[in-house]
Each structure stands twice: as structure tokens, then as C-alpha cells.
Image (spheres, rainbow, N blue to C red):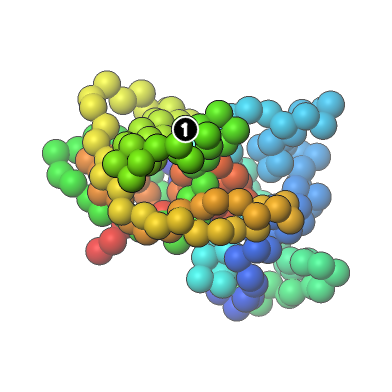
Amino acid sequence: MHLTTLSFPQIRLSRRDGHKLRGYFAGLFGAESDLFHNHGPDGKSIRRYPLIQYKILRGMPVLLGLEAGGRLLAARFLKIRQIEIDGISFPVLQKNMESEDYSVGVEDTLRQYRFLNPWMPLNEENYSKYESADSAGKKRLLESILNRNIQAFLTAAGHFEKERIMVSLDVREKRVQFKNQPMRGFEGRFVSNVFLPDFVGLGKSVARGFGAIELVR
């Protein structure tokens, strides 16, 4: 799986600016490819795992591209000279690009990951199930959702896993603001037998930076 990461270490933003970062680059490059914004010509969202993701990680703007999304980012790296958020223009004085190929999927070892930004697993369908479950039931439900989130990422990366994916969660609830609405997210760690590259997103709204992970080293 090919992965390209662009980072802008001299620019500092708030984590809630992730959707604004997405809006800026969608406006800048969106006419060239719908991978920058995941919307069709009719304006409706395209249901797929986002191949270009926009994140604020520890205050730093980061763009992550998988497969075709990574190649698009690499081709436009030199064109990025500023970032504009809320009418404020931040000149890009320093920018980094890393491109690498990874072998993702189930391994014979267990790895621990942490969520850098809140993970948002719940939707209208599973929210009521979560609310009505006891503590053990909540944990089982969340682990089942995380398993599917990992499978969705692997499929988008062109990897169709035949082996059993194992996950064990240790998370706590965290209220987050999403589209000016309070939502229930989760922060913490998980252990899995799957290798996942740093900064990829799991769960809902990964294009806006939610659910970004990193390996605990």
C-alpha cells in the first residue's frame, strides 16, 4: 500500500480546524479530482473510505494520502505555498513530504496503537445498541465496530484480509464537537494483530482527522 504524508511543522492550528483544512484544499485542488473532497458532481457525498485525509495532529496540519490519493498529494506538493483558515493566510515556510510503501494486514505479532484524535464509531444504527448495553456489551460492540473499521481501511488499501482480525480496546468516552453538534467520541488505545501505518484514520469522519492513530513504540 502506498502512503504519502504532507506536514507543515511551522503552522499551528486547533484540532477543530480539521474540517477547515479540508475545505481549503478541496477549494484549491477539488476541481482536479473528487478524491480531495469525496463529493460527486451532484454535491452528494461519495460513500467510500477517504483516500485523502486532513488532520491536525498535536497542533500540526497533516495531509495523508493513500494509493491514488497519495500520488495526487505528491504531485501537488510544490504548489502548496500557503494555507488559509478563517480568512487568515499562513505562509508555508517549511513543508515535509514522506512517501512509502507498506505491507498492511494481519501479522503474527500484537501491536498497540493510540488514538491521536477522538475515534467516532457510533452512528444512528448502533447508538441505541450502545446506550442499552452493559459495560461488557459496550466493549464487545465497540470492538466489533473497530474490527469493521480496520477492514474498511484494509480494503481501501487494496488488501483483502483472509485471516481473523483481533482487537482489544481500552478507551473512554469523550464529548466532541462535530458540525457544531456535541457527539460521543472515544480516546485511548487498542491492541491488534494488524499492522497499520501511523496517522491513518479509523471510524467516522476520518477525512476531517477523527480516529487518527499511531503505533505505541
Q: Is residue 141 left or right of residue 9?
A: left
- Residue nearest the observer in this picture, 24 or 97: 24
Quadrant housing residue 91:
bottom right
Q: Is residue 176 visible?
A: yes
Residue 42 is left or right of residue 193, and the answer is: right
Count of picture labels: 1
Tag 1 residue = 129
Compared to residue 69, the image places residue 25 above or below, namely below
157 or 118: which is nearer to us? 118
Q: Where's residue 68, x and y in %?
A: 56, 36
Tell me which residue sits at (25%, 64%) in the image. Answer: 217
Residue at left offset 24%, top offset 36%: 166
- Residue 15 appears in which quarter of the rendering? bottom right
The residue lying furthest to the left in this view is 108
| Residue 210 in picture, x, y percent from top left | 54, 52
Residue 176 percent across, percent down from the top left: 59, 58
Whether residue 74 is visible here, answered yes or no, is no
Q: Quadrant of the N terminus?
A: top left
Residue drawn at (84%, 26%), measured in percent from left and top? Answer: 42
Considering only vertical position in the picture, is 18 above or below 38?
below
Element class at badge 1: helix
Amino acid at circle 1:
Lys
For mark 1, does the 10 Å Cα neighbourhood hold few (<14), some (14 to 19), or many (20 or more) residues? Answer: some
In the rendering, at what x and y percent does residue 168 appear?
26, 45
